Image (cartoon, rainbow, N blue to C red):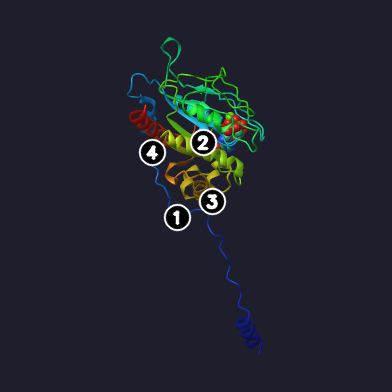
Amino acid sequence: MFRWIMRILWRNNPPKKEQTPESPLLDEPWRELRWGDRQRDLQYVQEYKPAREDIRYLRVLLYGPVGAGKSSLITSVSNVLREQITIPALANAITSDKSFTKQYDTHKFAKGRGSSKTFYSVVFNDIMGLEDGSNNGVHPNDIKLALEGRLKEGHKFNPVSPVTKNDPGYNKSPSADDRVHVLVCVVSANTPQIKSSVLEKMKSVRETASELGIPQMAMMTHIDDARGEIEKDLKTVYKSKHLRKKIKDFSAAVGIPINCIFPVKNYSEEIDLNDDVDFLILSALKKMVIFGDDFIEKNC
Ligand SMILES: Nc1nc2c(ncn2[C@@H]2O[C@H](COP(=O)(O)OP(=O)(O)OP(=O)(O)O)[C@@H](O)[C@H]2O)c(=O)[nH]1
Ligand SMILES: [Mg+2]
C-alpha cells in the first residue's frame, strides 16, 4: 500500500533533476593565442623602427571614458618593454567621474641607461578622459586636433573651450612625426554601460580618424575585476562567456570590429612582472605597431 501511494506521488510529482550551474567558460577559446610567444612579440616591438627617416616615433593616441585605464595602459606598456616595473604614468587612485589626466603628454620608453640611453620607437600620447556632459572632460575637437598632430606637448585641456588656431597649445605646422599613427580606444570591462553622450563623443572622434585614414583599435581593460574566472587565471580570457559578450556589445555600440578589440589587464597592484599580463599587452601592442606602420607607409 505504501509503495503504491509513493508510486502515484512520484508519477504526479517527479523529483526535480538537480540543475548543474552553467559553466561561465566556453569549452574552447574563441580566439587562439600562442601563450608561449611572449619573447618573439617582445623582440618585434623592441626592435621596431619606422622605415621613414623623418619619422622617429610611431605615435599611439589613447582616448576613452574617465578611469578606463589609459594612463595605466601606458605604464603597463612601459613595464613590458623595459622588462621591469617602472614609474607609473600617474593614474587615478580614487574612483571618480572626473578625469585625473589633465594635460597632453607624450610618453617615451627608455632603452639602456646613462649616456647610452635611447628610446623605443613607439610612443604613447595620454589624454584627459571623455566625460558625460558638454562642458566636462576632454572636448572631442581637441582629440581631433591631436590626431592631426596639432596639439602641442604639455597642453592643458579646458573642457569648456577647445583649442583654436590662435591658442599657444595649437601647432600650426605639424610634422609627420607629430601626427597620430594609431588611435586606440580604452574602455573598462567593469563598467555596466557607457553613457550615450560619451558614446556620441567617441563616435565623432572615430569618424575624424576614419576620414584621416588612421587605423583604430580598442583595449578592454579591468578584465581581472570584470567578475568570473579570469581573475583566477588570465589564460581563460578567451573562454569567458561574460567577456565575449562584453566585447561583442562594445563592438556593436561603437563600430570597432571585434578583431580589433583586445582584452588586457593593466599592471596596477603588482610589484613584479607577470608573464600572462605581459603576453596580453604584447599581443595588442604588436598589432598597434603593425597597424601604425601600415599607416606610416601609405599615408605619411
Ligand atoms: N584591476 C585593475 N585595475 C585597473 C586596470 N586598469 C586600470 N586600473 C585602475 O583603475 C584606476 C583608473 O586608471 P587610470 O589609468 O587612471 O585611468 P585613466 O583612463 O587614465 O583615467 P583618467 O585620466 O581619469 O581619465 C586606477 O586606480 C588603476 O590602478 C586593470 O586592468 N585592472
Ligand atoms: Mg589618465
Q: Earlier in the sequence, mark 4 or mark 3?
A: 4
Q: How far apart are the two marked residues, 4 and 3, measured between alpha carbons?
A: 25 Å
Q: Earlier in the sequence, mark 1 or mark 4?
A: 1
Marking on residue 36: 4
**Amino acid at the residue labelled 2:** Val
The residue beneath circle 1 is 27
Q: Which residue is disc 3 drawn over?
A: 242
The Cα atoms of the two marked residues, 2 and 3, are separated by 28 Å
In the current view of this chain or complex, which residue is farthest to the top? 115
Amino acid bearing label 4: Gly
Quarter holding the C terminus is top left
Q: In what element is the residue under mark 4?
A: helix
Q: Are marks 2 and 3 in contact (CB under 8 Å)?
A: no
Nearest the eye: 2 or 155: 155
Please identify, in this view, whether the residue under mark 2 or under mark 1 is nearer the observer. 2
**Residue nearest the viewer, comparing 95 with 167:** 167
Earlier-in-chain disc, 2 versus 3: 2
**Distance from the alpha carbon under mark 4 to that under mark 2:** 36 Å
Residue under label 2 = 205
Tell me how far mark 1 sits from mark 4, CA to CA: 21 Å
